[in-house]
Image (spheres, coloured by chain):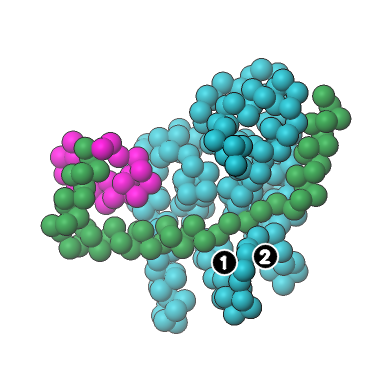
Chain colours: A cyan, B green
Amino acid sequence: MLRKLISDQELISQYLTGQESSLQELITRHKAKVYTSIYLLVKDKYLAEDIFQDTFIKVINTLRLGKYNEEGKFLPWVIRIGHNLVIDHFRREKRTPMITNSEGFDIFETIQFVDENIEDKLLREQTYTDLQKLIALLPEEQREVLIMRHYGDLSFKEISEITNVSINTALGRMRYALNNLRKLMNRKDSGVKISVSNTL
Amino acid sequence: MIQTLTPTDLLRQLYKETSTDEGYELENCLLQDENLKKEYMNLNQVKNALDSIQLNPEDSTIQKILNYSLQTK
């Protein structure tokens, strides 16, 4: 319980003095957001696992070199590292991410839940799958902003700097992303065809 | 102070990037403008749905990271 009151900054300091458990706490605290943001970008479980691992290895190396100076902003820093590794991967691959057939693996084996009956579990899993597929349908720049803001906790200002656009453009893309998702969610329920908007 | 309320101000409010004063101003506007209120609720609905997605890496991946830290100490 006391662990939850300790800031990320304090955990980093403890880790650098040799407390490995503090690293574990940091990872446990932020693993869902980091992994989810990577996964939604690459849409491949195994690749997401690799990039997640590489992200935290880079975190460890940077901390040990004394090059971490993001006081109070640990999660956004980690998200940026992960995001950059995703970009590096696709540059090497020279392709954009395609949707992986979810029948090939069970993405929900990694989701933790407690005290859920079978019907709720199936409904929740279907909702997760559907929403992830809808996110994959968004134009890339909208998906990118959405993932960085919603799962990465980066501010719109930080996102604008990373993506080299104005803050208003970043906000506009987010607005389009949320509105397009809403249309897609409604379309899915009603069976009506609606086009996704990708212009500002 | 928000001179003219825009939909992007709603987004900033949704993601808690407005100042306290801006927040109060927005809340007042939402009370008075049904269209604005509807848009805010629509955005909030999707945001809540996004909150439902929470994936986690395998325990084995985390263990590899922790092993790396120990082995390279």
SS class of the residue under badge 1? Answer: helix
Closest to the observer: A90 or A46?
A46
**Mark sitting on residue A128:** 1
Residue furthest top in the image: A66
Label 1: chain letter: A
Look at mark 2 in the image and give the residue it sits on. Answer: A108
Closest to the observer: B49 or A176?
B49
What amino acid is found at the position of numbered circle 1 in the picture? Answer: Tyr
Q: Is residue B16 magenta?
A: yes
Q: Which residues are magenta?
A: B1-20
Residue A196 image position (x, y, % from top left): 42, 65
User: Which residue shows up at 54% across the image and 35% down it?
Assistant: A5
Chain-order first, disc 2 or disc 1: 2
User: Which residue shows up at 83% across the image and 31% down it?
Assistant: B70
* Pointer 2 with pointer 1, Cβ within 8 A: yes
Local crowd size for mark 1, using a 10 Å CA cut-off: few (<14), some (14–19), many (≥20):
many
